[in-house]
Image: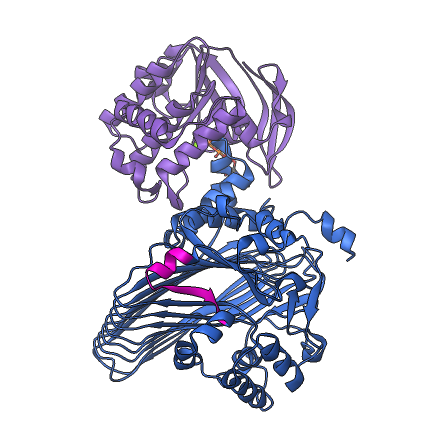
Amino acid sequence: MLNIKNLEATIDNKLILKGFNLNIKPGEVHAIMGPNGSGKSTLANVLSGKSGYEIKGEIKYNGKSLSELSTEERAQKGIFLAFQYPLEIPGVNTNIFLRTSLNSVRKANGEKELDTLAFLKLIKEKSSELGIDEKFLSRQLNVGFSGGEKKKNEILQMKLLQPKLSILDETDSGLDIDALKIVAQGVNSYKNKDNAFLIITHYQRLLDYIKPDFVHVLSNGKIVKTGKAELGVQLEKTGYTNLV
Amino acid sequence: MKAEDLKNNKEYKYGFTTEIENIKSPKGLSEETVKFISNIKKEPKWMLEWRLKAFNRLKVLKEPNWQKPKYPKINYQDLYYYSAPKSASEKPKSLDEIDPKILETYKKLGIPLDEQKRLNGIAVDAVFDSVSVATTFKDELTKKGIIFCSISEAIQKYPELVKKYLGSVIPLSDHYFATLNSAVFTDGSFVYIPPNTKCPMELSTYFRINASETGQFERTLIIADKGSYVSYLEGCTAPMRDENQLHAANVELIALDDAEIKYSTVQNWYPGDEKGVGGIYNFVTKRGACRGKNSKISWTQVETGSAITWKYPSCILQGDNSVGEFYSIAITNNFQKADTGTKMIHLGKNTKSKIISKGISAGNADNMYRGLVEIKNKAINSRNYTQCDSLLMGNKCGAHTIPYIKNGNATSTIEHEATTTKINEEQLYYCNQRGLDQEEAVSLIVNGFCKEVLQQLPMEFAVEAQKLVAISLEGSVG
Ligand SMILES: Nc1ncnc2c1ncn2[C@@H]1O[C@H](COP(=O)(O)OP(=O)(O)OP(=O)(O)O)[C@@H](O)[C@H]1O
Ligand SMILES: [Mg+2]
């Protein structure tokens, strides 16, 4: 599904990703761990098509070069990023945002757009699965939401848009214990053989709930170690000292 | 720019011209022109005298120049003050008699005038250059005693009402453009709602400038008698031309005891091209008097067009407990300029006013909110709340807010809040990541920003206005 070869990413003359390689197949869950500033969010941004990066190397998504696709086209083709810091957009009603987003994606894929009623039914179902109070959905997008509420809202959007490749950038940070379980359940219930996850995290506890197939350690813009789920458990004990 | 290029400029979809034979006044501003207008409209003597009084007054007035957007000197001798389709010289008695070319024009503008396809529940008065060409739903309104017709017709048929109220809110000698309008006004709408009557439908006027080198001097007068209610809406478009055209309107509203007038404008005059060539100068005087106790006047404006918009729809709160409201969205893109706002003059006791202004600037445009809130010393227990928000798109545009505040007594309060925000790249990226393209993202954010004002518009027009807002900002980001 995703093949990254020798990826280099530079922003404002600073080289951040320095020869990054990764292959993800449908149905797989990959975790990326690594010290602050090692380039995890940069990777997420580059994959989702944020502007401002100078890119070298190759990123293929379902066999096609990603560089030819705009940010919205990538999203429409199933790349989803749950942001480390979800943006607040004052004045924009959350429900309207979610519906516009869903319909843009549906339209791009030749599906029928949902009318207000059909949408409300769908969103009601998805939000109750995540224990999100409907009242949130009539508020301005992320404005005044607590850290954890913002993160849950990201997962709600994931479940709504049904992406192929979901990149979760520190979605666990800021969640309380119950919310963490709910979010993990949300991910697990959505996981299937056709979609894949790239989970960026600092903590093993998320991986206790969502079992990764691979754990990668990113340091200074490169993957320095790859292992199975046990690597995460080990890192929790030893830290990155021997690796970076 | 050649006519050909203008045609290719597709962004302004109302920019077409209707080829039609016109009757025009002599060129230039003179006593002869004033007499010509009055004569062709077969006006009574008192009306001509009123016009001439304004014309004489104009000679000693100077064009104001304190506004922010400057413009090249207008040569008033180089304009036509009256232009009307020949076919309309005898006002058609029924819609079948209207020149098909004019019907076609309004159809293209999305304003069907023919019987079957009339807008649902909205009565329309259509003003083409200097004359009203059609008014729909007249019979139904007449049954309730509501008068909705062109001002020209009102001068003939209801002289007592016109004499009593015309110029009673905007005095004949008020200021240069108002006085100019009083001398040469051509057409516009007249509305009278009898006591204790709720007008059963939206009344609307659609203004169209077609002829070149022509100024449009609209005059509208709305009177809501005791305990009545009316919602009125005006829309405006003009062809694309590389000359600047002047639209100098006077609009007077009068609300008597317990009456309410809701006046909405969706202004989409040709804004000029992306280099700033052409476009309408929209210099308008709009003023409402809450003359009776418990009366209310509410102005809502969505200003997306014109090269320069210069207007301050105002409320004079004379009656005790009267309420004035002003909701505004002013969008300027490319080289458009706007200097707009309101005046709320509190004279009666317990009077309230509310001002919500949303200015959006993109490209090289400049947007100014200028507002006066004045509470006189006898207007005890009065309140004003003002909120001015500016949204900037890009780095080359400007937004300014100048509130003038005068509070003449200690029991009254004036509150003012202002914010300036920029649509930022991060917000757009977030939207893009959710599958929205740039235009969708901008329109979502902008409509969110203007929501409070859009909500004030009658339903059908809110949807239109929302689209218009998105279209006027197309291509302004990224
Ligand atoms: N515009 C920029 N100009 C210069 N340096 C930048 C810019 N953006 C990011 N960086 C730097 O790139 C490095 C990688 O940042 P990134 O956000 O990818 O780290 P991260 O691995 O996600 O860290 P964390 O765990 O703290 O979230 C950091 O050192 C950061 O300061
Ligand atoms: Mg990060």
Q: Position of residue A11 (x, y in %)?
A: 59, 38
* Towards the viewer: A237 or B232: B232
Q: How many marks?
A: 0
Q: Nearer the viewer, residue B274 or A229?
A: B274
Residue B74 horizontal side relative to residue B462, left or right: right
Res B271 quadrant in image? bottom right
Q: Compared to A150, does B10 lie above or below? A: below
Residue B145 part of the magenta-drawn span: yes
Quarter of the image with the N terminus of chain B is bottom right
Of A161 and B12, the residue lying toward us: B12
Q: Left or right: B164 with respect to A62? A: left
Colour in which chain A is drawn: purple
Evaluate whether residue A39 shows in this view.
no
Colour theme: by chain
Q: Which residues are magenta?
A: B139-151
Location of residue B439 by image quarter: top right
Q: Is residue B349 above or below residue A170?
A: below
Residue A174 percent location from the top left of the image? 31, 33
Instruction: State the residue in front, B314 or B365.
Output: B314
> Which residue is found at the position 63% from the left and 30% from the top?
A55
Any part of residue B472 in sight? yes
In magenta segment, residue B231: no
Q: Which quadrant does ligand 2 occupy?
A: top left
| Quadrant of the frame with the C terminus of chain B | top right
Q: Position of residue B198 (x, y in %)?
A: 29, 59
Q: Residue at x 66, y 69 (%)?
A: B214
Spot the blue chain and give its letter.
B
Give the quarter of the image for residue B306: bottom right
Residue at 39% over, 54% down: B457
* B28 lies above or below B338: below
The vertical placement of B25 against A95, above or below, is below
